[in-house]
Amino acid sequence: MSEQPAEISPEVAAQLATLRKSIDNLDDALIRVLAERFRLTQQVGELKAEHHLPASDPNREANQIARLRALAADANLDPDFAEKWFHFVVQEVIQHHRAIANGDK
């Protein structure tokens, strides 16, 4: 069952459009920063593979989680959310590193 859109005033519509444009701009920036992060982790993966190092580094991950949780708290962002995001990204990075080590990338 879908909701019918409420009638909104032109002023509210304009405010929504402005806010949504700002959100879109931030989404664009986040994607570009994430792409740069993955370019760097690709280089890390290649270096690890070259030197037969493991794909994951639990000590580094623990330090990063603590650092990012503190940054999130300082930025008034839920630290649990920041940690979930980090785990998601790290799992993807580890998969890339394993693929590189196996000669798949």
Image (cartoon, rainbow, N blue to C red):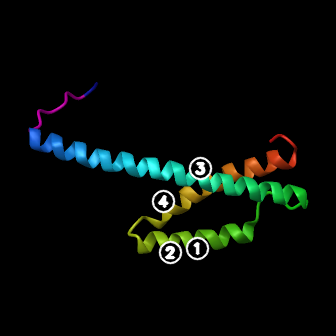
Task: Work out whether mark 3 precedes mark 2 in sequence or the reverse, and give the earlier one.
Answer: 3
Q: Nearer the viewer, residue 39 or 99?
A: 39
Q: Which residue lies under the disc numbered 4? A: 81
The residues bearing labels 1 and 2 have C-alpha atoms spaced at a distance of 6 Å
Which type of secondary structure does the marked residue at label 1 adopt? Answer: helix
Q: Who's the residue at 29% across and 45% down the image?
A: 20
Decide which of tag 1 and tag 4 comes sooner along the chain.
1
Tag 3: amino acid: Ala
The amino acid beneath tag 1 is Ala
Query: What residue does disc 3 label?
Result: 35
Percent x, y for residue 34? 56, 52
Disc 2 target residue: 70
Q: Which residue is mark 1?
A: 66
> In the figure, is residue 7 to the left or right of 85?
left
Alpha carbon distance from label 4 to label 3: 20 Å
Q: Are marks 1 and 2 in contact (CB under 8 Å)?
A: yes
- N-term mark: 4 or 3: 3
* The N terminus lies in quadrant: top left
Amino acid identity at mark 4: Phe
Residue 23 coordinates in the image, percent (x, y)? 35, 49
Q: Nearer the viewer, residue 98 or 103?
A: 103
Kind of residue indicated by mark 2 = Ala
Q: Which residues are magenta?
A: 3-9
Q: Is the residue under label 4 in contact with that under label 1 (CB below 8 Å)? A: no
Determine which of the numbered discs, if any, sits on residue 11 in the image.
none
Front tag of 3 and 2: 3
